[in-house]
Image (spheres, rainbow, N blue to C red):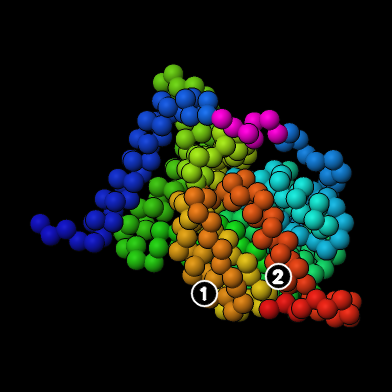
């Protein structure tokens, strides 16, 4: 019998699903040993930094948008990824403030303390929430930073509101570990894509049961969760950072995760890229298993003004894994994309590229 590409793809998809489950089960056996590795982050204080301000803003559809901010000066707007919260920006809420910036981080609806309104958890609704934050806080000359789904929200935001760049609300964007096209690639046969569509909600619910520690057959609660979350990191991650990601993931309701994962797997906003008028910084870990490096290469190659930084041995969680390097890149990029004003011309600051 001739084996078609479609059948191979379906088999590969099914095998991958079984393989992930098997890997998680096998990994749970060794995770406690892995947790005993030296971990400098274990001595760090992950309570919110002093001077953190909280706001609750109304969304256009009757929901609520939770925002945290620190510092004064030119703003950064930070938008996290799926199953994360503003906690994922813990280091940046310190490092960018110390560099002289105002840092605003929002909980995406359905995550943290933000609540969806009648429009649910669509990418369009999330992008409009970001628009509401920019408007409500009167953010100008903003460096908008998105991680994973957060960057996808920025794509949608700029597609819906291109005037944010010309009006000066957004000066530049940073796209960290993300994709503009279907995560599984463009050559997935229709039958395999349909299988993924059917299985994704189940996988989403299973992921949340794992991250919440509801495991079976005597495994230590959180062991399987740690294995799942470990996949988001590159070489030799901090067990403390993996646990922080697990804690964030466990707090997001399973139906929301299932809905969003299905959306993100099939997302295709490539046609938006050539129209992005803001300069873009594209950052990706070379060991990113969730949004592999070629996705960032494509993005950087199709936004008119963009630069790409690939980080060796780094995974998907760049904010945790490359704290100092990310801060340095963001501050340097912010300075180089500062809008030209009378003040900057007098000071001799070069214009944005």
Q: What is the number of callouts on the image? A: 2
Mark 1 secondary-structure assignment: helix
Residue 7 is situated, as x and y percent measured from the top left of the image, at 23, 56
Q: Residue at x 42, y 27 (%)?
A: 30
* Residue 43 belongs to the span the image colors magenta: yes
- The crowding category of the residue bearing disc 2, from other C-alpha atoms within 10 Å (few below 14, some 14 to 19, many at least 20), is many
- Residue positioned most to the top: 218
Which quadrant of the rendered structure holds the N terminus? bottom left
- Residue positioned most to the left: 1
Lower position in the chain sequence, tag 2 or tag 1: 2
Which quadrant of the rendered structure holds the C terminus? bottom right
Query: Looking at the image, which is closer to me, 188 or 320?
Result: 320
Q: Which residue is mark 2?
A: 172
- The crowding category of the residue bearing disc 1, from other C-alpha atoms within 10 Å (few below 14, some 14 to 19, many at least 20), is some
Disc sitting over residue 301 in the figure: 1
Q: Residue at x 57, y 75 (%)?
A: 303
**Do the CB atoms of the residues marked 2 and 1 lie less than 8 Å apart?**
no
Mark 2 secondary-structure assignment: strand
Disc sitting over residue 161 in the figure: none
User: How far, Cα to Cα, is label 2 from label 1?
Assistant: 16 Å
Can residue 132 be seen in this snapshot? no
* Residue 138 belongs to the span the image colors magenta: no
Q: Seen in the image, is 116 located left or right of residue 148?
A: right
Residue 156 is situated, as x and y percent measured from the top left of the image, at 62, 67
Q: Residue at x 39, y 52 (%)?
A: 196
Residue 121 is situated, as x and y percent measured from the top left of the image, at 62, 54
Which region of the structure is painted magenta?
A: 38-44
Q: Where is 159 relative to 319, above or below?
A: below
Residue 189: image quadrant is bottom left
């Amino acid at each position: 019998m001739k084996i078609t590409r479609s059948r191979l793809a379906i088999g590969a998809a099914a095998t991958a699903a079984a393989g992930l489950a098997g890997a998680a089960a096998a990994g749970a056996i060794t995770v406690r040993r892995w947790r005993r590795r030296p971990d400098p982050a274990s001595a760090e204080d992950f309570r919110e930094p002093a001077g953190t301000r909280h706001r609750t803003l109304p969304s256009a559809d009757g929901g609520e948008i939770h925002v945290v901010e620190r510092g004064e000066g030119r703003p950064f707007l930070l938008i996290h990824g799926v199953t994360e919260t503003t906690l994922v920006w813990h280091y940046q809420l310190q490092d960018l403030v110390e560099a002289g910036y105002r840092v605003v981080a929002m909980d995406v609806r359905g995550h943290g303390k933000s609540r969806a309104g009648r429009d649910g958890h669509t990418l369009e609704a999330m992008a409009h929430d970001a628009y509401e934050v920019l408007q409500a806080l009167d953010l100008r000359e903003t460096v908008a930073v998105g991680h994973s789904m957060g960057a996808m929200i920025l794509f949608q935001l700029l597609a819906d509101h291109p005037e944010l760049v010309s009006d000066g609300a957004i000066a530049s964007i940073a796209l960290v570990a993300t994709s503009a096209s279907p995560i599984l690639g463009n050559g997935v046969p229709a039958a395999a894509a349909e299988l993924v569509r059917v299985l994704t909600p189940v996988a989403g619910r299973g992921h949340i049961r794992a991250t919440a520690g509801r495991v079976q057959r005597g495994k230590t609660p959180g062991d399987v969760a740690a294995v799942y979350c470990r996949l988001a990191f590159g070489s030799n991650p901090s067990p403390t950072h993996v646990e922080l990601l697990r804690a964030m993931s466990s707090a997001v309701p399973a139906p929301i995760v299932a809905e969003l994962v299905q959306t993100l797997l099939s997302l295709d906003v490539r046609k938006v890229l050539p129209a992005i008028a803001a300069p873009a910084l594209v950052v990706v870990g070379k060991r990113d298993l969730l949004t592999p490096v070629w996705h960032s290469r494509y993005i950087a190659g199709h936004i008119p003004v963009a630069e790409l930084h690939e980080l060796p041995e780094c995974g998907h969680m760049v904010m945790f894994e490359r704290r100092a390097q990310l801060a340095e890149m963001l501050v340097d990029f912010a300075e180089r994309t500062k809008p030209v004003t009378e003040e900057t011309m007098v000071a001799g600051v070069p214009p944005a590229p």
